[in-house]
Amino acid sequence: MSLIFYAEKCTACGQCEDVCPFGILRLEGGALSIAEGCNLCGACVEVCEAEALALPEGEAPAPRPGAPPDGVWAFAEQRHGELAPVALELLGEATRLATTLKAPVAAVLFGDQVDHLAPALLTGGAQKVYLAEHPQLAEFLEEPYAAALTELAQKFQPEIILAGATYVGRAFIPRVAAALKTGLTADCTAFEIDEEKQLLLQTRPAFGGNIMATIITPRTYPQMATARPGVFKALKAASSAEAGSTTGQMPGSLEPSEGLVIRVELGSLKADFHSRFIATVAEIKERVPLAAAEVIVCGGRGLKEAKNFKLLEELADLLGGAVGATRGAVDAGWIPYAHQIGQTGKTVSPRLYFAVGLSGAAQHLVGMQSSDFIVAINKDPHAPIFQVADVGLVGDLFEIVPALIQEIKRDRG
């Protein structure tokens, strides 16, 4: 399909040429020409007062709702009746954004017989929970999940929808954005609100992590983004132990009785979908999963060879933590990919992070910079890792780490 142009209506004012982000429209000799490559963003249609430009039927982006939007939604991912940690992380961030927007926060929960998870979401910051229970939603499949969220968004019209950049989020959220004819920014690591324009500023790494791009969705709604797990913090009142629990409130938390659980019936789930669920194959897990570890000891190329990772394993075992690695160490074959932290690996947010023998490239910092406390060990005093570290130790890691191990052992008797 291509942009529709009514030449007889065109006044050659040039406004469409000014706003076209791709340089597709050009005024030549007082006549408008349209080159190939138009992606039908609709920017020119909005500014054309003569109505000489139009989008093909079915391609027009959805305008912002006239009535007040339904606020900020966080998709509450669950697997086998347990909330994914990213669900509470998103609620914490959604609460912060909604405070600026002066808008409500809602969690969207899909599954079958998962109503026992609603109290944890209300405790975690949601003011209401949209609950859709159906056999089609019992196990994750892209088509029914996308159809369900699309129908829900069309009915209640949220201003913002956030989801985790997990396997689940990455698989079905793009379908929802396409169905709603709106934009989507993937793998975000930061959000802010432009208070003047009421827009979500969506920041994510670009060009291999060398720059941080901030993206907006100014002409369509809802504004949609996926966020990397482990980057944002759940509300302090909602500990990970509460996920999936129906009892136990903490001081300052939102009581489940104060929130609202809205059960929704979705007609879109009556359709015949092209895929069906067969079985779940359990993945092989690390000794201590990186995403759940409160202490991580991460090594880089400064370790020189694979056998030296045993030094980090000893320190991690003493602290009850996990071992991580940079992409350089993984590419060198010193440690499996499951341990990789960074833009092309895992995003972590432990309480204590040891960065041992790594420089702190931007691609690595994306995956660990939200750690509560960072200790850096590097012989180069100008290494970028020291800019984000809480404590920096300049010296030979092969002297510092063994000394640290011995000191911990001595302290423990």
Image (tube, helix red, strand yellow):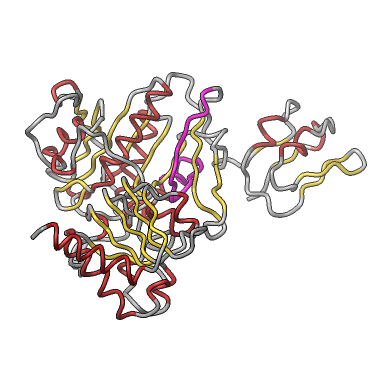
Q: Foreground residue, 395 or 22?
A: 395
Q: Where residue 54 sits in the image (x, y, percent)?
A: 67, 37
Apparent side of residue 193 relative to residue 3 in the rendered image (left or right):
left
Give, as a single range, the part of the protein colored magenta: 176-195
**Residue 300: in magenta span:** no
Is residue 160 found left or right of 306 in the rendered image? Answer: right
Residue located at (32% from left, 65% from top)? 400
Instruction: Return the residue nearer the eye: 209 or 226.
Output: 209
User: What's the residue at 6%, 33% (across, down)?
Assistant: 247
Residue 183 is one of the magenta-drawn residues: yes
Q: In the displayed structure, would residue 87 be above or below residue 10?
A: below
Quadrant where the C terminus sits is bottom left
Residue 335: x %, y % from top left:
32, 75
Q: Is residue 195 above or below residue 164?
A: above
- Image check: 16 left or right of 345? right
Rendered location of residue 39, percent (x, y): 63, 49
